[in-house]
Image (cartoon, grey):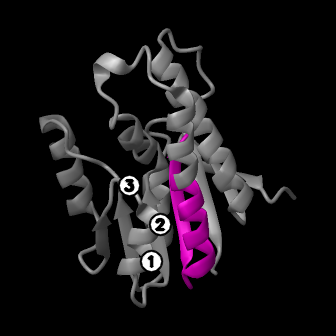
Amino acid sequence: MGKVTLLLGGARSGKSFYAQEEAKKVKKVLFVATAEAGDADMRRRIRKHQEERPANWHTLEATTHIGHQIEDTINDEELVIIDCITLLVTNILCQIDEKDFDTCDESLLEKRVYAEINELRDCLKKVDADFIIVSNEVGLGIVPDNRISRIYRDLLGRANQMLAASADEVYLMVAGIPLRVKPQK
């Protein structure tokens, strides 16, 4: 088990850029991309991110079950970047039909997210590499006006707490500046 770093922050706070700059300090990197190309804009964003990554990085596109997929894929990489938990939780929620958002069983979604995060936490213990995990902090704004958004905010917050408990270091990114949260000085 290597060092685990969790990067939290809002949209465009510099999380992914910081993770990639840190990764450039090592030679062998596995980049785990959790995004799904659901529309033309997302396809463009994914393509741009792919072009920005160094060509020698190994990429694993995994929308769920990322812990098992990392274990099955990793070779001699020294560092694994997971970008990002935000989209991983979104992918789990998107397994529900939109028409069922108002009546979906929140406890079922909670079990799925917890299982996914626990699978990842098990992977962190088994894999001999450092990890940088990227996730959004979405709990700092107003309470969302619809049920599925509130469920999403709560599930992502709990996922972030679970990962922070397993992390050696946690940083909150603000305007591209990493503020260390764990360990505290």
- Residue position marked by numbered label 1 in the rendering: 71
SS at circle 1: helix
Q: Position of residue 155 (x, y in %)?
A: 57, 35
Q: Amino acid at mark 2?
A: Gly
Q: Quadrant of the C terminus?
A: bottom right
User: Which mark is first along the chain, 3 or 1?
Assistant: 3
Are the residues tagged 2 and 1 within 8 Å (C-beta)?
yes
- Residue position marked by numbered label 3 in the rendering: 64
Left or right of 174, for residue 98: left
Give above or below for 5 relative to 37. below
**Residue shown at the point (62%, 63%) measured from the top left:** 5
Q: Amino acid at mark 3?
A: Thr
Are the residues tagged 1 and 3 within 8 Å (C-beta)?
no
Q: Position of residue 13 (x, y in %)?
A: 50, 41
Q: Position of residue 26 (x, y in %)?
A: 47, 82
Question: Over which residues does the magenta segment extend?
Answer: 116-137
Please say whether residue 78 is one of the residues in the magenta stretch: no
Q: Nearer the viewer, residue 77 or 100?
A: 100
Residue that extends furthest to the right in the rendered view of this protein: 185
**Residue shown at the point (63%, 68%) measured from the top left:** 4
Left or right of 1, for residue 25: left
Which label belongs to residue 106? Answer: none
How crowded is the residue under tag 1: few (<14 C-alpha within 10 Å), some, or many (20+)?
Answer: some
How crowded is the residue under tag 2: few (<14 C-alpha within 10 Å), some, or many (20+)?
Answer: many
How crowded is the residue under tag 3: few (<14 C-alpha within 10 Å), some, or many (20+)?
Answer: some
Q: Amino acid at mark 1?
A: Glu
- Residue position marked by numbered label 2 in the rendering: 67
SS at circle 2: helix
* Residue at mark 1 to residue at mark 3: CA–CA distance: 13 Å
Residue 179 seen by the camera? no
Q: How many marks?
A: 3
